[in-house]
Image (cartoon, rainbow, N blue to C red):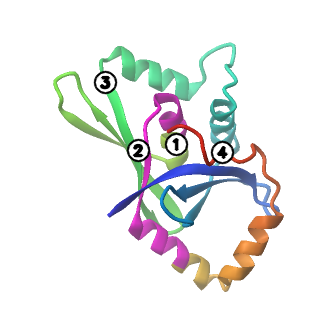
């Protein structure tokens, strides 16, 4: 089963300095943190803030190529978490209605979803696997919640962004 999520925040991990995307279930308080690269975080932040770069960035180029080929991005889905690595797919529809799925990193899929104005989903198994990973690292849920409150919010509250 999959749940629809929105970007709740884009933060910096205070320990590693690595950007984190916080995805939040649109129907509950469930959140999923995904650590991403600096370039992908920048691409996501630029689109959230609606800052147009002077030349197309990689995710803009991908969106432009998809449109020129007559395809439509239907949605992106974070599909699994294996060995502390998240996996995602980009689901597209061709001109003839034929469905297509492209393997993707979640950060790239999310950056494209923002540009294509399509929904983001997460498989429930990913959320459960993420909780299990956190638990095996001896980090209690209350510690995680208090740490989250201390992290600086890079782009502000993005919970009501259109997706």
Q: x%, y% of residue 40?
A: 63, 40
Marks 2,1: beta carbons within 8 A: yes
- Residue drawn at 82 percent across, 61 percent down: 14
Secondary structure category for the residue under label 1:
helix
Q: x%, y% of residue 7?
A: 59, 48
Q: x%, y% of residue 101?
A: 30, 41
Residue highlighted by disc 3? 71
Q: Residues within 10 Å of mark 1 (few under 14, many from 20)?
A: many
Secondary structure category for the residue under label 2:
strand
Q: Residue 76, labelled with which disc?
A: 2
Q: Residue 110, labelled with which disc?
A: 1
User: Which of marks 3 and 2 precedes in the sequence?
Assistant: 3
Question: With respect to residue 53, does 143 lie above or below?
Answer: below
Q: CA distance from mark 3 to mark 4?
A: 28 Å
Q: CA distance from mark 3 to mark 1?
A: 17 Å
Most foreground residue, 78 or 27: 27
Residue highlighted by disc 4? 158
Quarter containing the N terminus? bottom left
Q: CA distance from mark 4 to mark 1?
A: 14 Å
């Amino acid at each position: 089963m999959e749940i629809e999520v929105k970007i709740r925040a884009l933060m910096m991990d205070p320990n590693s300095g690595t950007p984190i995307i916080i995805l939040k279930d649109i129907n509950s308080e469930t959140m999923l943190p995904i650590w991403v690269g600096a370039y992908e975080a920048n691409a996501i932040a630029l689109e959230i803030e609606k800052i147009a770069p002077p030349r197309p960035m990689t995710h803009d180029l991908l969106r432009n190529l998809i449109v020129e080929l007559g395809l439509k991005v239907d949605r992106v889905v974070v599909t699994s978490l294996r060995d502390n690595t998240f996996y995602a797919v980009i689901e597209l529809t061709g001109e003839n209605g034929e469905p297509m799925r492209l393997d993707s990193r979640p950060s790239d899929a999310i950056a494209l979803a923002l540009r294509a104005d399509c929904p983001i989903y997460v498989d429930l198994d990913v959320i459960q696997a993420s909780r299990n990973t956190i638990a095996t690292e001896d980090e209690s849920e209350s510690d995680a919640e208090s740490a989250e409150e201390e992290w600086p919010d890079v782009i502000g509250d993005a919970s009501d962004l259109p997706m």
